Amino acid sequence: MGNIKIIKPASSQGSYPSNMAGYIDEAGDKDLQSILHEQGDKARQLFTGITDEKSRYKYAEGKWTIKELLQHLIDAERVFAYRALAFARKDENTLPSFDENEYADNSNAHARDWRDLINEFNAVRQSTEYLFNSFSEEALQQIGKASNYTITVSSLGFVIAGHLNHHLKIIKERYLNSEANPE
């Protein structure tokens, strides 16, 4: 773990836009390094408990399968981590938005091996942990612009964590709840 404990920013600091507050709240109240590491372990445990057959399940028409949802988590974490890297390096360019549905439609997740997706998630999460552990205090406070909002590097870390927690809840409630999808 890095030497700097990354703590959750207060919404009153203006370090993230209001539309990201839900994800930041979902992240929890520990330091970012602890959150990323612990939730990575919990996510791995959840994903490895899902069979390949179950990974193809979607709880309603027009919704993603579990495979597509895991691919979305991988893609989103990469996008948010890239934004954090760019902003930490003082890149003054406005980074583009990304259309999560367009990414999902073009991900080919349905043809991927479930275990390979889990391994890719593990690699991306480990990379994210290393990235945030590498940032100095100055880098963590850098502000950048993506799409139509500004956000700090440290806030992006909590967005990554909260985004995963948000979707893990959905997986448990809508995909794995035995009442919602009896086998």
Image (cartoon, helix red, strand yellow):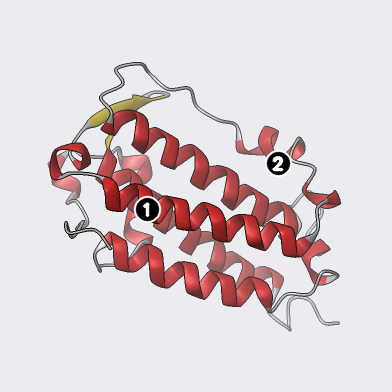
Residue 130: image location, x then y, percent:
37, 53
Q: Please report the residue visible at 29 percent of the width from the left and 27 percent of the height from the top.
A: 144
Q: Within 10 angstroms of label 1, few (less than 14), some, or many (20 or more) residues? A: some
Q: Please report the residue visible at 55 percent of the width from the left and 66 percent of the height from the top.
A: 168
- In the rendered view, tell whether residue 56 sits above or below residue 84: below
Whether pointer 2 and pointer 1 mark residues with C-beta atoms closer than 8 Å, the reply is no
Residue 146 is left or right of residue 182, and the answer is left
Residue 178 is left or right of residue 1, and the answer is right
Residue 110: image location, x then y, percent:
83, 51
Name the mark nearer the viewer: 2 or 1: 1
Q: Please report the residue visible at 73 percent of the width from the left and 83 percent of the height from the top.
A: 178
Q: Amino acid at mark 1?
A: Tyr
Q: Secondary structure at mark 2?
A: helix
Residue placed under numbered mark 2 in the picture: 104
Quarter of the picture holding the N terminus? bottom left
Residue placed under numbered mark 1 in the picture: 130
Residue 109: image location, x then y, percent:
77, 48
Q: Work out whether residue 140 or residue 101 is closer to the camera in this orientation and state it.
A: 140
Q: Amino acid at mark 2?
A: Ala
Quarter of the picture holding the C terminus? bottom right
Q: CA distance from mark 2 to mark 1?
A: 26 Å
Q: Please report the residue visible at 24 percent of the width from the left and 44 percent of the height from the top.
A: 135
Tell me if residue 103 can be seen. yes
Q: Work out whether residue 167 or residue 115 is closer to the camera in this orientation and state it.
A: 115
Residue 33: image location, x then y, percent:
30, 62
Question: Where is residue 87, by image quadrant?
Answer: top left
